[in-house]
Amino acid sequence: MKRRGQTRTAIGIDVGTRSIKVAQLTLSDDKPQIAALSMLPRSKDGEDIDTEELHLMKRVLKRQGFVGNEVVLAAPQSGLLQGVFDVPPQVSGAPVAQIARMELSRIHNVLPDSFEMICWDPPGPGKSKSATQTIAIGCPHEVADAYIDLFENAGFNVRALDVRIAATARACLPLTMPPPALTSILDIGWDSTKLLLMCGEKVIYERHFRNKCLAKLRGKISDTFRITEEAADQVIGAIGFEANSEAGDLDEETVEVIRRMLRKHFDQMLEELEASFDYAHYQYPGEGAKRLLLIGGGARISGLSQYFHNILGVEVKSVAPSDLVESASQNFLKISHPAMTIAVGLAMFTGE
C-alpha cells in the first residue's frame, strides 16, 4: 500500500514457542508509525512452524490489515553460531571480518564458507592497541535456506533473515541513553531470558540467563497448587507484584505464597543482572548501566518494573511497540504488548 508520502514496510515476523508476533509500519517522511500489529497463538505449541500453520497465519494477517507479502524474519535462534573474541583493530589494516569468520568457524567446527555472518566491535574505553573485542553471529546456509523456503512455499517473499539481537537494538534505540551511559535490555521470554547491554547504538554484551524463563515459573506454580498450566499463567498475570492487584477468589495466604514464589524467581534473575552490571562497569568505567528496558512476555507482569527499580536503583521501564513508534490508531494500544517489540524491530529492517 502506498499513499501520498506513505509507504508500508515489510512485515516483521517473530516466531516464538507459544505465539507468533507480527508487525508492520507505515513510513511517512521516514517517520515510522504502527500500521498493523498481531499476536497469534501457535496452533502447534512448542513445535517447529510448518506450511499449514503459515497458510493459516497468512489468511489471518490479511484480515487484520497487513498489506503485501514481503517479510523480514527472525532467524531461528537454535541454529545460530555465536562468538566473542579478540581480533586486530580496524586501523591495523587486517581483514577483520575474514579473521572473525575463521575464528567463528573454528569455535563451532564448521567450514568458513558454510554460513552468513555479521560482526561488530563494541565501542568504548579499555581496548588495547594490539587487539579489539569482536562480536560475531553466523547463520548456517542450510538453516537459513530451509527457513526461507518454508515461508516462500507458503506465498511469502522473504526480504531478509535478521537476528533478534539486531532487531531488539533497532527497536529500542529511541529509548537508549547517549554514551558513555549504558542501556540494558532484558527480554523475559517464555523459554529463555536474555540480557543485552548497549552503548549508544551498539550492543556490547549479551548474556543468557539459564532456567530463568516464564515456563519454569509457571511449572512451579502449577505443581505447587495442582492447577493447570493455563491457570498458572492467569495467576501470574493477575497477581504480579502490586498489592492492589486483582486476586480473584484466591485467599490472602495463597496470594502471599504466590508472591513469594514470584520474588524468589525474579530475585535470582536480579542477582545475575547485578553481576552483569558489575562486569559492564569494569569493562566500561564511567556511568555504567543507567536504564533497564523490559521486553518479552514477562515484562507485562504488574509491578515488575517497580520491583526491579527498588532493588537495582536504576530507571526501569516495560517497553511495548506503542512506547517506541507512534500509532495512527488508538486501536493498536489495546494490543501493544512488550512481547511484540522484536517484531517491530524486524519491520524496521532496511538492510543497512
Image (cartoon, grey):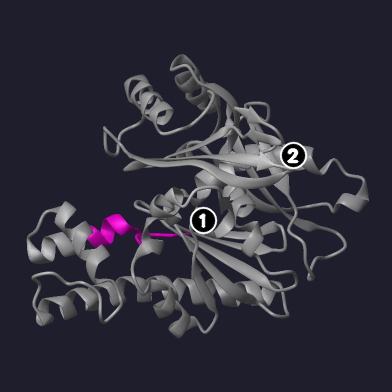
Q: Please tell me whether residue 193 is drawn above or below residue 150 in the rendered image.
A: below
- In this rendered view, identify the residue nearer to me: 16 or 276: 16
Q: Quadrant of the N terminus?
A: top right
Answer yes or no: is residue 106 visible: no
Per the image, label 1 sits on a secondary structure element best described as helix
Drawn side of residue 213 relative to residue 246, left or right: right
Q: Which residue is pictured at 39% across the width and 29% down the height?
A: 63
- The quarter of the picture where residue 157 lies is top right
Q: Quadrant of the C terminus?
A: top right
Drawn side of residue 307 relative to residue 42, left or right: right
Drawn side of residue 254 relative to residue 64, left or right: left
Q: Which residue is pictured at 54% across the width and 70% down the height?
A: 292
Please state which amino acid type lies under the numbered disc 1. Ser
- In this rendered view, identify the residue nearer to me: 295 or 62: 62
Mark closer to the chain start, 2 or 1: 1
Answer yes or no: is residue 129 visible: yes
Q: Which residue is pictured at 78% across the width and 40% down the height?
A: 97
Q: Which numbered circle lies on residue 352?
A: 2
Q: Please tell me whether residue 315 is drawn above or below residue 63 in the rendered image.
A: below
Please state which amino acid type lies under the numbered disc 2. Glu
| Residue 244 magenta-highlighted | no
Which portion, as a residue range, is magenta? 208-218
Mark 2 Cα-neighbour bin, 10 Å: few <14, some 14–19, many ≥20: few
Q: Please tell me whether residue 342 is drawn above or below residue 246 in the rendered image.
A: above
Which numbered disc, 2 or 1, marks the residue closer to the eye?
A: 1
Q: Which numbered circle lies on residue 322?
A: 1
Quick check: marks 2 and 1 in contact, CB under 8 Å?
A: no
Q: Position of residue 346 (x, y in %)?
A: 57, 41
| Residue 213 magenta-highlighted | yes
